[in-house]
Amino acid sequence: MTQKSNVVLLVPGIFDRGRSMHRMQAALADEGFAAHYIHLHYNSAWYGLKYLSRQLEQRVEELVPPGHSFALVGFSMGGIVSRHFMQARSGLPRVHKYISMASPHRGSLWANLLPYPGGRQLKIGSPLLEQMNTELECLASTAPVSIWTPFDATILPHSSAILPLGSSHEVPVKLHRWVPLDARVISIVTNELRQAMSD
């Protein structure tokens, strides 16, 4: 039987070198969580999301003790990379809580500006997203949480950031890149992870 660990893996978004996640990482550490920022190489998604989820899989093996589950928190593209790890790399049994922040679960118009594999996979109606969304119910075991802002100019339409499963939180953050830095978002994530440990 898998035992819950206090490990939290923070997966950043596209072009993000981790600065957006450091405040959350510190706050979670103060709450007793072993929070790790996962730096994905070529996080422009030049080689596609499958390439990035393979890296996440490797980091899970390094950071999570065998026989233990962990929490997965993804920002923007990081939320989709996290889903690919769970849904296509058999990572789901290892995750007891999944939180996405401003992630394009059904794609974004903004991705049309990225003419390479990762951009095409983040477009509305991409085969990768369509396949994962047909298997959405499998995420129920992670009691998924989606956090979104109605002012997001990167995730368009805004509804794409809301998973039709689990719970969602609307937080009026003014800019996409500020979402994981916002104190209200950090508080929601902390409370959700704390509750997941006690369930």
Image (cartoon, rainbow, N blue to C red):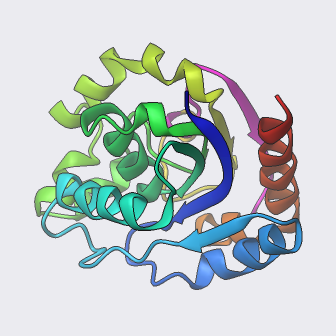
- Magenta region includes residue 80: no
Residue appearing at x 26%, y 40% in the figure = 89
Residue 127 drawn at (x, y percent): 16, 31
Task: Name the quadrant containing residue 163.
Answer: top right
Residue 110 drawn at (x, y percent): 36, 56
The relative height of residue 141 versus residue 15 in the rendered view (above or below) is above
- Tell which of 169 and 38 is nearer to you: 38
Task: Name the quadrant containing residue 107.
Answer: top left
The relative height of residue 94 versus residue 136 in the rendered view (above or below) is below
User: Considering the image in quadrants, where does the C terminus appear?
Assistant: top right
Residue appearing at x 66%, y 22% in the figure = 166
The relative height of residue 154 versus residue 71 in the rendered view (above or below) is below
Task: Name the quadrant containing residue 152.
Answer: bottom right
Left or right position of 193 against 39: right
- Magenta region includes residue 172: yes
Query: How many discs appear?
Result: 0
Residue 123 drawn at (x, y percent): 26, 44
Residue appearing at x 39%, y 47% in the figure = 80
- Tell which of 33 and 53 is nearer to you: 33
Left or right position of 61 against 94: left
Residue 115 drawn at (x, y percent): 13, 63
Is any atom of residue 101 visible in this view?
no
Is any atom of residue 41 visible in this view?
yes
User: Considering the image in quadrants, where does the N terminus appear?
Assistant: top right
Residue appearing at x 59%, y 33% in the figure = 162
- The boundaries of the magenta stretch are 160-173
